[in-house]
Image (tube, grey):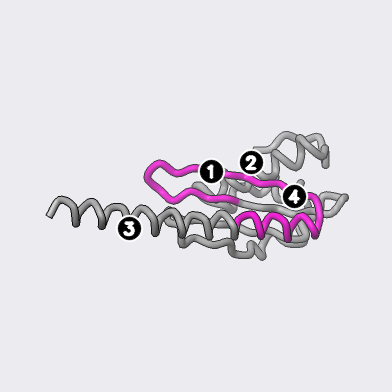
Amino acid sequence: MWLRFMILIGILWLVQVVLTYFQVTHYNKRILELKNKGIVAIGRSKGVINAGAIVILATDEDGRIVDAEIMKGISVFARFRKMRKLIGKHIEEVSENLGSFRGQERKAVEKAVEDLILKNGFFSKTVG
């Protein structure tokens, strides 16, 4: 009985490792694809009880968002989805309208915008 339980735990652990590998592969693929579109920034927000969020923003050299994706969830099945409401907007506009986002999504967008501002100096206003 005990041996069967340990084998089951081992199989479940192995399945988790495989699924995590596929999620990390998907994450890296999305980053590389967005890097081909412009300057990339990543914002992460960990949830303790709630689902966390990861936002990837790609901008042109003027600070206009050319692509944006978000991954929210607590499982290895979470995948990136387009954030169409950000595409075409300038970083400054997104920074000034963070109130339109909620919870972990807002924190992740804010961190990605801060990353773009700090690393690339798109404008001098502070975020928030």
Label 4 Cα neighbours within 10 Å, binned few <14 / some 14-19 / many ≥20: many
Disc ID at residue 11: 3
Q: Earlier in the sequence, mark 4 or mark 2?
A: 4
Q: Which residue is mark 2?
A: 111
Disc ID at residue 45: 1
Which residue is at the front of the view, 98 or 118? 118
Residue shown at the point (46%, 62%) measured from the top left: 77
Residue shown at the point (69%, 37%) measured from the top left: 127
Residue 102 image offset from top left, x and y in percent:
52, 50
State which mark lies toward you, 3 or 2. Answer: 3
The Cα atoms of the two marked residues, 4 and 2, are separated by 12 Å
Span colored in magenta: 27-54
Q: Quadrant of residue 82?
A: bottom right
Q: Which residue is mark 4?
A: 40
Residue 33 image offset from top left, x and y in percent:
73, 61
Which residue is at the front of the view, 63 or 47? 47
State which mark lies toward you, 4 or 1. Answer: 4
